[in-house]
Image (spheres, coloured by chain):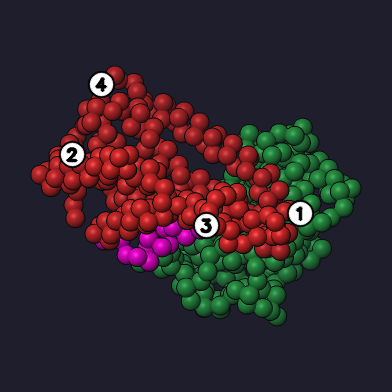
Amino acid sequence: MAFLELTRVSFSYPKRGRRVLTEIDLALDRDEITAIVGPNGGGKTTLTKLMIGVLQPSGGQIRLDGRPLAGYSLGEIGRRVGYVFQNPDVQLFCGTVAEEIGFGLTNRGYKPEMVEERIQFYLDYFELGVYRNVFPLHLSRGEKQRLAIAAVLANEPLFLILDEPTAGLDAYRKKLLADYLQKIARLGRGMILVSHDEPFVGRMAERVVALKDGRIQSDSGRKGNAAYEA
Amino acid sequence: MKLDPRTKMVMVVCLSGLALLYNTPGQLLLVFAVTVALLMIFHFELSVIGDYLKPFLSLMLFLLVIQCVFSPGGEVLLAAGPVPLITTGGLSMGVCVVLRIMTVAAAAMLFTTFSSRDFILGLVQWKVPYELAFMVSIALRFLPVFRDELSNVVTAVQLRGVELKKVPWREKMALYRRLFFPVVYGTMLKAQQLAVSMEARGFRVYPRRTYLRRLNLLGADIAVMLVCLVSTIMLIALHFT
């Protein structure tokens, strides 16, 4: 049984006639890294928003861990699936960088010492230590991106969806991110990468799904990269 | 009905003015009914008006309860021992506050029937300085942005695994209080960035502005404005006599 399963999923935005996604069938497991690629406006971000319940499909069904996604609350989905938005500004809402990383854990009742330990680890790993007490929206684009990723990873979700995770990152930070994602993937955390960064996708993805005009144009299947090369 | 944006602005000012002035449920209900009737003339369906007012529901309920409990007067309807909880005076005040909010919010729906460009043009043709008109238009544009911002934060909070519905009321209030200032500050930062972007694109470079289009007040506009203004002045005069 796939961890995340989409069956004939379609979507149109209310009051707009055009279909953004048409009859998408996709099954994603927790032990693979899947990249979703395709041109702008092809429906990649919309597809990932449907996967986390922020948008509701106009047709078809999505199942998470064997249960219909509609039966989960956003909070329940958030505990299972970590989502990094394309624009980090929309997911940074705390007063300081440290609070941002520890927010999920603090509010889920973790012990303060454990939260602090986790905050320190991610501050160090993503080289945000000097900004510990800085207001998150004062950071640069790349720093905000690192913080958004750190804040999601700190929750240790079972599955990750990262929308353009390398946007604004320099080569060194991309490598750090790739190393970390590969490390957690080896521990059994599946993930979806939505990206236009071909070298990053080439290095990370075991499976590449190409979307065009709201339809799956190709799916390399597991452990292959035929679609991306095509 | 096709009316000039300025006519609609006058209607909004008259309706909101009366809503703020009146303080009995009967009077306010009448103003609200007139507002809804006007909106229906402008082809708003009742369900659309209902959907528009829905986000204000929690605020209205909160204020209703506060007014009921803390505005004493009249007969006691509910008491906890010797302490009166709900009085007829408090209930009346609460209903007034709710109707006032509903009227002002519903009247503001008229602003959605014309573009922000027409709004600025209308004010400028009434000799309001362009900068001021633009500022008001931006402020109106920022209200939905701020609402979206709050909605994004609530979504983002839940996606970090926090079950907002299960958080006890008191903790939820503390959480919202903690999130409020960063969100407001974030919106201010965006406003600042907008100002820089506008100036970078030459806003206020030339002291004189020219306009490609002009709005023209037709006979129907003047008639509607006169009816609105005269009836509002009469109602205000009646209120104070």
Q: Nearer the viewer, residue B208 or B63?
A: B63
Amino acid type, residue under disc 1 in the picture: Asn
Chain designation of label 3 = B
- Residue beneath disc 3: B88
The boundaries of the magenta stretch are: B43-59
Amino acid type, residue under disc 4 in the picture: Arg
Residue B223 percent coordinates (x, y): 14, 45
Chain designation of label 1 = A
Residue B188 percent coordinates (x, y): 54, 35
The span from disc 3 to disc 2 (Cα, nearest Å) is 49 Å
Q: Are marks 3 and 2 on the same chain?
A: yes
State the red chain.
B
Return the residue found at the far top. B207
Tell which circle, 3 or 2, labels the residue nearer the N-terminal end: 3
- Residue beneath disc 1: A107
Q: Nearer the viewer, residue A77 or B113?
A: B113
Residue B89 in view here: yes
